[in-house]
């Protein structure tokens, strides 16, 4: 038996190298250090690509094979392309996605925070995306908020009849290839869902072996534990995941430790509970985030302004203080884009709270400087927490252009808080396994050839809060599905992304 296995192995190896005299490889990456995305120590090896896949990793005798292109990666790392499990953007409108590619991201997961990428059929949307030829691979979740809207659920938890109809839409999206369901419980309309509704839908997700990814009900320091607990309950039904894990206005490494410990305990209870985070101390979302649940919509706000503006004013005043004051809101859209609430109020000769009151919840989006760097650093470097950007090409926040490069520049090179192997694992193998992507995220024979060549010392995130749309540097060579999309630091014209659909 053993002899037979050894023989088969030998035949397998011969098949890959010596037997390949008549086989032609498209790319031979030679001399690099393979950091394979599993977290295992990097090692020297050659890598061969044929068509869209990795064909061989090991020692190659260049004289014995036929190769179209050879790339010398001496002194550099060869890793899987990164997978961004919490991304935004519209692949039909802006398919180039240089912001993602430049920081090494070759796959993005859309449909976040309760919003599907379309309110129509996902199958149709996939076709539109394919026609637009995106530069990165596109996967999606279906959004719980969108399911509610399709069914027309009002400002309350769904009743049984509505749940049945939501279930049918959810099943259709899962059959069309969604990787799971996202919830946005801090937003309209997700915030109207109760425990029974979330459990009912999580059960459907679990029956299809998919994941529930959640922007939890509140990320505030005094509510984060109960928000994670609400998600963990759904973990009895399906795999669950906390998106952009943070503690708004919490401070310090101990506070991070407590949250991470809570998640660890869920895991020990057998709940599959994962999390991602982006490496910045400011969030980015609509200014509605500071408005109370009873004045989150335009209509509710107008009504409140007519009936009891002073109650809303004192709520906002307290909220602003709690969230580091009016200097901590940096508008990214609307008439005050680029200014803080304080600066905008000064310009108008108003109190910041009065300007906010007058603007209402839907007037603009903003970066909110409500996180503590020390705390977020602990979350970012914690084992088991993966990296996301929560960004897009157009969002006025550096995370859509810098997150993945910043992990290497700040946490590997400057702080030495992560090894390059750990960092790459958090950005490729771990996210792939978490969302159930079986043929990417790890460099191994048969997997799709989404590949980066880089020198970690040259990786820099250039995006800042005042200039958020600066491309990252250092990922000079990039392949997506076996096609070279970046060559010696320059983008080629090729857009080789595919739509990724989770199979039943
Ligand atoms: Zn979110």
Image (tube, grey):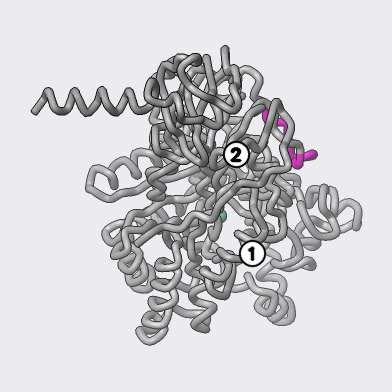
Q: Is mark 1 within 8 Å of ligand 1?
A: no
**Residue 455 is drawn in which quadrant?**
top right
Please provide the residue range marked out in magenta.
460-469
Residue 287, horizontal then vertical, whole percent: 69, 59
Residue 277, horizontal then vertical, whole percent: 51, 42
- The structure residue drawn at horizontal position 29% and vertical position 65%, both measured from the top left corner, is 207
Image quadrant where one finds the N terminus: top left
Q: Does 210 appear above or below 403?
A: below
Q: Does 268 appear above or below 32?
A: below
**In 3D space, how far apart are the residues under numbered discs 1 and 2 (Cα atoms)?**
47 Å
Q: Is mark 2 within 8 Å of ligand 1?
A: no
Rate crowding at label 2 as few (under 14), some (14 to 19) or many (20 or more) other CA atoms within 10 Å.
many
Secondary structure that dominates the magenta span: loop
Which disc is residue 89 wearing?
Answer: none
Image quadrant where one finds the C terminus: bottom left
- The structure residue drawn at horizontal position 38% and vertical position 43%, both measured from the top left corner, is 433
**Which type of secondary structure does the marked residue at label 1 adopt?**
loop
Which of 341 and 234 lies nearest the eye of the viewer? Answer: 234
């Amino acid at each position: 038996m053993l002899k037979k296995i050894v023989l088969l192995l030998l035949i397998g190896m011969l098949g890959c190298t010596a037997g390949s005299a008549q086989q032609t490889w498209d790319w031979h990456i030679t001399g690099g250090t393979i950091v394979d995305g599993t977290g295992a120590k990097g090692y020297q090896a050659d890598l061969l690509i044929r068509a869209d896949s990795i064909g061989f990793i090991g020692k190659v005798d260049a004289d014995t094979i036929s190769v179209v292109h050879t790339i010398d990666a001496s002194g550099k790392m060869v890793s899987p392309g990164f997978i961004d499990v919490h991304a935004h953007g519209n692949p039909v409108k802006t398919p180039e996605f240089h912001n993602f590619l430049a920081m090494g991201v070759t796959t993005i997961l859309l449909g976040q925070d309760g919003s599907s990428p379309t309110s129509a059929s996902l199958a149709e949307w996939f076709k539109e995306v394919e026609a637009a030829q995106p530069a990165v691979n596109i996967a999606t979740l279906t959004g719980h908020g969108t399911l509610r809207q399709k069914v027309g659920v009002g400002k309350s938890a769904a009743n049984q009849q509505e749940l049945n109809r939501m279930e049918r839409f959810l099943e259709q999206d899962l059959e069309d290839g969604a990787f799971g369901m996202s919830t946005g419980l801090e937003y309209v309309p997700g915030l109207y869902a109760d425990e029974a509704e979330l459990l009912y839908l999580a059960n459907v997700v679990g029956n299809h072996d998919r994941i529930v990814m959640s922007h939890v009900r509140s990320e505030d320091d005094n509510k984060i534990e109960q928000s994670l607990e609400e998600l963990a309950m759904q973990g009895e039904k399906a795999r669950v995941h906390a998106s952009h894990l943070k503690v708004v206005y919490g401070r310090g490494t101990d506070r991070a430790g407590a949250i991470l410990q809570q998640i660890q305990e869920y895991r020990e209870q057998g709940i599959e509970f994962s999390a991602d985070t982006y490496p910045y101390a400011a969030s980015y979302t609509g200014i509605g985030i500071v408005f109370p649940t009873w004045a989150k919509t335009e209509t509710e706000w107008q009504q409140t302004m007519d009936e009891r503006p002073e109650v809303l004013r004192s709520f906002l005043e307290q909220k602003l203080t709690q969230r580091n004051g009016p200097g901590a809101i940096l508008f990214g859209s609307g008439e005050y884009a680029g200014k803080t609430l304080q600066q905008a109020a000064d310009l108008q000769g108003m109190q910041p709270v009065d300007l906010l009151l007058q603007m209402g919840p839907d007037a603009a989006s903003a970066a909110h400087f409500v996180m503590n760097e020390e705390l977020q650093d602990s979350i970012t470097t914690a084992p088991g927490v993966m990296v996301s950007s929560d960004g897009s090409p157009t969002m006025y926040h550096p995370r859509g252009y810098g997150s993945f490069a910043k992990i290497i520049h700040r946490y590997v090179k400057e702080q030495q808080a992560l090894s390059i192997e750990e960092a790459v694992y958090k950005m490729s193998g771990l996210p792939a396994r978490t969302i159930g992507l079986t043929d990417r995220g790890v460099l191994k024979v048969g997997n799709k050839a989404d590949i980066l060549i880089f020198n970690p010392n040259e990786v820099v995130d250039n995006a800042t809060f005042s200039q958020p749309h600066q491309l990252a540097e250092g990922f000079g060579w990039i392949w997506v599905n076996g096609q070279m999309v970046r060559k010696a630091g320059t983008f080629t014209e090729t857009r080789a992304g595919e739509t990724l659909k989770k199979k039943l």
